[in-house]
Image (tube, rainbow, N blue to C red):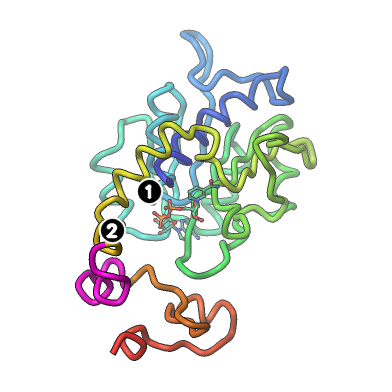
Amino acid sequence: MSEVAGRMATQQGAKYLEKSQGGSGVLLGGVPGTAPAKVTVIGGGVSGTQAALMAAGMGAQVTILDTNLERLRYLSEVMPKNVIQLHSNPSTLENTVHDADLVIGSVLIPGAKAPKLVTKAMLKNMRKGSVLVDIAIDQGGCFETSKPTTHKDPVFTKDGIVHYAVTNMPGAVPITSTVALTNATAKYTLQLANMGWKAACMANPGLALGVNMVEGKITNEAVAQAFNTNYVPLNTVLS
Ligand SMILES: NC(=O)c1ccc[n+]([C@@H]2O[C@H](COP(=O)([O-])OP(=O)(O)OC[C@H]3O[C@@H](n4cnc5c(N)ncnc54)[C@H](O)[C@@H]3O)[C@@H](O)[C@H]2O)c1
């Protein structure tokens, strides 16, 4: 689903940059003789990588920020030349957000709320009509001014900046999303159906990692920390 949301983020961002949609009126790739749009992607994981690839393919000038140097090294090897990689810190964030036409937020700290990396104060330095797409809104959002929206009413404008923060982006493209999700999950579903959840989790550590709660006990350490409650290791529940 992150792959779908990442690709959609660029598509939606391009749409809301149009003047008639409340945006500044910039075409993502520009045309010969004009400057392309500047796109900043915060978080170079699954969704951020797909967002950056789409934006680069449309001819934008893309910057992707991440705190994970290994990930940045990988991205520098596989991304096209119109994507640059930057280490994410307050200074690089401030500079790249300030100058961007489109900012896509795609950070994740597993089990925790997303950090607020773009503050309300930073919006004041952006060009009016620039667009923020907060993919991480399902984890609370990584922009201070984000609030969850729906496909029926996907955007709002705050301090002159258009915000798109739909919590279930893949829901807009159910044909693609259903096939993609089934491709990724069918083998797990079959294992659960054939073996029952306990045996399936013992046989497949990948499934065990997905178990957050069993009979009221929280079996995911990060989730337990986020809710400030007791963590019960899954193996003690399984045995
Ligand atoms: N809105 C939707 O419909 C929708 C759909 C799918 C996923 N999501 C959400 O999108 C978010 C991203 O998911 P993902 O699968 O791409 O996660 P991911 O784990 O693949 O990538 C997250 C990246 O964020 C980076 N990161 C962490 N802190 C950072 C910081 N301070 N600055 C820059 N980068 C930082 C990590 O190093 C990692 O590379 C999650 O919150 C996920 O739940 C939303």
Q: Is residue 18 left or right of residue 234?
A: right
Which residue position is annotated with label 1? 46
Q: Work out which residue is located at the far top of the displayed protein and give it.
A: 32
Image coordinates of residue 191 in percent, x first then y, are 24, 62
Q: Could you say whether the residue bearing mark 2 is in a helix, strand or loop?
A: helix
Residue interval drawn in magenta: 194-208
Tell which of 136 and 208 is nearer to you: 208
Image coordinates of residue 71 in percent, x first then y, are 31, 54
Mark toward the start of the polypeptide (1 vs 2): 1
Quadrant of res 50: top left
For the point 37% across and 87% down, the residue is 233
Residue 116 drawn in magenta: no
Residue 200 drawn in magenta: yes
Q: Work out which residue is located at the far left of the displayed protein and give it.
A: 203
Q: Which mark is residue 188?
A: 2
Image coordinates of residue 17 in percent, x first then y, are 63, 25
Would you place residue 122 above or below residue 11 in this image?
A: below
Amino acid identity at mark 1: Val
Query: Can you tell me whether the CB of the residue at mark 1 lies under 8 Å from the nearest atom of ligand 1?
Result: yes
- Kindly report the distance in space between the C-alpha atoms of the residues bearing marks 1 and 2: 20 Å
